[in-house]
Image (cartoon, helix red, strand yellow):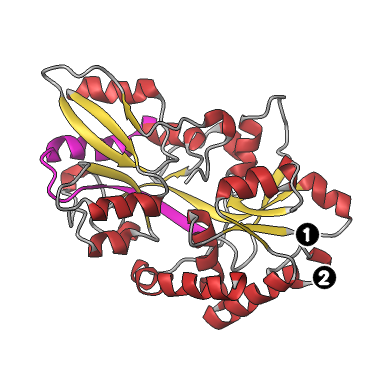
Amino acid sequence: MNRRLFALAATALATATLSPLTHAATELRVMVHSSFALPKPLLAQFEAQNGVKLAIIKGGDAGEMLNKLILTRAKPVADVVYGIDNTLASKALAAGVLEAALPQTAGAVDTQLGDALAAVDYGFVTLNYDKAAVAKTGTPLPKTLQDLTLPAYKGWLVVPNPATSSPGYAFLLATVAGMGEEKAFAWWAQMRANGLKVVKGWSEAYYTEFTRNQGSHTLVVSYATSPAAEVFYAKDKLTESPTASLNLAGGVFRQVEGVALIKGTAQKAAALKFVDFMRSAPVQQALQTEMWMYPAVAKTPLAPVMTHAVEPKAFESLPTQVIADQGAKWVARWTQVVLK
């Protein structure tokens, strides 16, 4: 996925074990998407307190991760999974890879992800712009998505392909939810004619094509927290982010990620402890500057650097079942409209 991991934070291990296995420890296999990151001392503390040895399995992008779980459901490769979101929840449940419900002892389960998944964090896929590049053009920022179809904004926007990118998919869903299907695809067709750039994933869009990183596109599909990450990882101390989010109606999608038990796990007790761990105060605090998401547990203090991120007041959403029923069709139609 690599959608929130800025270069200095990336740790890309396919499978990571965190401490030597003792005879008394229970191995807990945890499947996560590739953007998962938490401080190693925090994970080690969980192991020590619970007599558990964690085997963290990086499953790739969230969609790729879910596909791996589906393909191995007859012989599960994990006991618990983190990173299935509201765009994938119905698919996961329909495929029968998750325990249908979390016991109440696992903590309050958030209704936005149903009974099987406990929400851990949320974020907003939205447009980001390079402040210096916009100033250099002398053109005011667009006020609507429709403005982006005007000649003044030709070639401004780069998007990750929704067929291969989670934020790209979320942005497509936002346009459909905000405009309605027909108007949304008419907009995409207009954007194609106005110099829209499409790349495979978020990393290429942000680090190669975005003007902030010497690319040629002033706007990029990213996250509302990306400006805060720019400040956090800057080599020089910054008092202001060089980028900002541009939260336009029909261009913001709220993504909620959760943790769930894999159906058939033999380590249910340990897996439930991991569910509680992911919703604990230390994890809810740490994930903000490790994975650049907002904490799902209410009243969790925000990290100071999050003042550089503007949480959108309005966003688009769709019922998870609608996404499950229509998502593949919309991606196929998008491919036809934008790429063919």
Above or below — where is 142 with respect to 233?
A: below
Placement of the C terminus among the 4 image quadrants? bottom right
Residue found farthest to the bottom: 182
Residue at the spot x=74%, y=53% of the render? 217
Please state which amino acid type lies under the numbered disc 2.
Pro
Q: Nearer the viewer, residue 59 or 295?
A: 59
Is 271 within the magenta?
yes
- Relative to 281, is 311 on the left or the right? right
Is 101 within the magenta?
no
Q: Horizontal and vertical percent for residue 36?
A: 41, 38
Residue found farthest to the front: 340
| Picture quadrant of residue 329 | bottom left
The residue carrying pointer 2 sits among few (fewer than 14), some (14 to 19) or many (20 or more) residues within 10 Å by Cα, namely: few
- Pointer 2 residue: 151
- Relative to 198, is 54 on the left or the right? left
Residue at the spot x=48%, y=55% of the render? 166
Q: Horizontal and vertical percent for residue 331?
A: 48, 69
Q: Which residues are magenta?
A: 253-282
Q: CA distance from mark 2 to mark 1?
A: 13 Å
Please state which amino acid type lies under the numbered disc 1.
Leu
Above or below — where is 280 with respect to 190?
A: above
- Pointer 1 residue: 141
| Picture quadrant of residue 71 | bottom left
Circle 1: element type: loop
Residue at the spot x=43%, y=69% of the render? 318
